[in-house]
Image (cartoon, grey):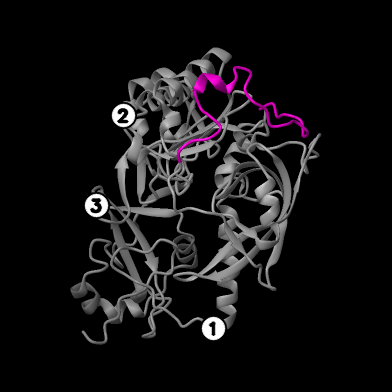
Amino acid sequence: MDNLEQPTQTNPIPPENFSEPKKPMNSKIIIISVLVGLVVLVATGYGFYRYSQSAKNVALPPGNEQVSATKTGCSLSGQTTEGKILGGIETKFINLPSDAEKGGEVIARVLNTNPFIVEVLDSKPYPSYVFDGLGIQEGLFVSQSEKDKIQSLKFNDIISGNLYGFTYASVELAFGTAIKDIKKIDGQINYFSGSPNPFANRSGTLIRYTPTTTNSNGFILIFNDRKVFYRDNNNNIFADKQLTEKELEDLLQLFSQTKFNNIASDFSVSRYSPSLSLICNRYQPISLDKNSSDIKPITDKLDSIIDSYRSEATRKLTYNKKYIIKNWEYESIVPLDEANKITFRQENKARLSQMKPSESLKKEVDEFNTYYRYKGKIYSVYFGSCVDGSAGTWGCFGAEELRTEVSGGKHYKTWPQELSVKLKDVSTSGTKIPKDEYLAHKDFYDTLLTWQDNLLFLEGDYLYQRLWVSLE
């Protein structure tokens, strides 16, 4: 038994009980890994990509509008220009190190001067991931050279400035961003780009709400021009909504009725954590973890707005990959239910090591587009990379049953027959789910709002991976 080697799978999706041998990384591989990491970082803009594909017809404002107060006026909200503040957070001034790198220029709206917080309205170059590069920015460092300028600024001023990136010592080596060369803009604003993303509406954010149910993705923004931007936990984006004047008036009055103005601003609140911000006469962010019961009428109203968008949305079913299932025709060589058993491998090692699979089968297995059916069960198979001389033969072959129960790895379910939407009719670009069909099977379809890589669905002779329902 000491000489009996289990094959190691080389396919992209390894079976549960096998692991690939690890090789030490050389310097070339490390460099490649860094480059891959950069590619992955850019790929995090996927949520914005989905917006750009689904909201191409959204009317975008021109490039020179001013930040403006709402037509209804902020007096309805009861917010004053000054209010209570939780202490402990101040502007982080820094002497920029000599190796700080200029990252670009911004045009921003001043929300608070100490700590210094801005709402970035435009950027040059335009950020590849708008949710990090635009909008409300907490945690900016400020160059020491700008200290006097900061003190002369006030809420709602529009400024331009240059951003610099640098590293600094923290618990670990950290990366920071500092603003320098600040200039107040009076008169017309000449933005860098003429078609802003709706996430960075240039009329300015009026209300920002991140619900307690967020996973750091979900939030809603209501702007001064009454337009609304909503992103849910699954990166579905609604960018074509707008409140009526009456809807906004009613919402602002709830802030007054709940005495929101009396709650202390908490500048330690992250925009990704459960929070509510009113930006009428000042920037007033608060944590929902501490104040949710006091402002429940406001959050209930905002939740109802979100629910209305979701209920009106079109559901679309999409999948990422489709596998064919073939009958296993090599039982005389390796019965799939015996393939990984020690006794079978020990008794048949010599025989199998003398037999090579056909090139067509080897290619089919290596491409990993096929599962195999054997005795009523479904298996993934692979030819591994053995170092005992059996590589490339049936002696270096393995199989893994795809089970119907959750076992910590890949598993499958049969696509419900009662659904009118059949997977064979779903294209890779997605198929709309009729509203009556969705309502009749809402509980099931809602389980697909978040896709699971380890869950496949079986219909006929095909398995479908990463099925999910998106909202449009």
Q: Which residue shows up at 66% across the image and 37% down it?
A: 197
Which residue type carries mark 1?
A: Asn
Name the residue beneath numbered marker 1. Answer: 26
Q: Is residue 287 left or right of residue 68?
A: left
Tag 3 secondary structure: loop
Magenta stretch encompasses residue 63: yes
Name the residue beneath numbered marker 2. Answer: 443
Task: Mark 1 or mark 3: name the one nearer the start of the chain.
Answer: 1
Which residue type carries mark 3?
A: Lys
Q: Is residue 53 left or right of residue 424?
A: right
Report the residue that reaches farthest toward the left. 343
Viewer-nearest residue: 464 or 448 = 448
Q: Which residue shows up at 62% across the image and 31% down it?
A: 55
Quadrant of res 463: top left
Q: Which residues are magenta?
A: 58-84
Q: Which residue shows up at 70% across the image and 29% down it?
A: 60
Viewer-nearest residue: 60 or 52 = 60
Name the residue beneath numbered marker 3. Answer: 375
Instruction: Categorize mark 2 by other alpha carbons within 10 Å: few (<14), some (14-19), many (20+).
Output: few
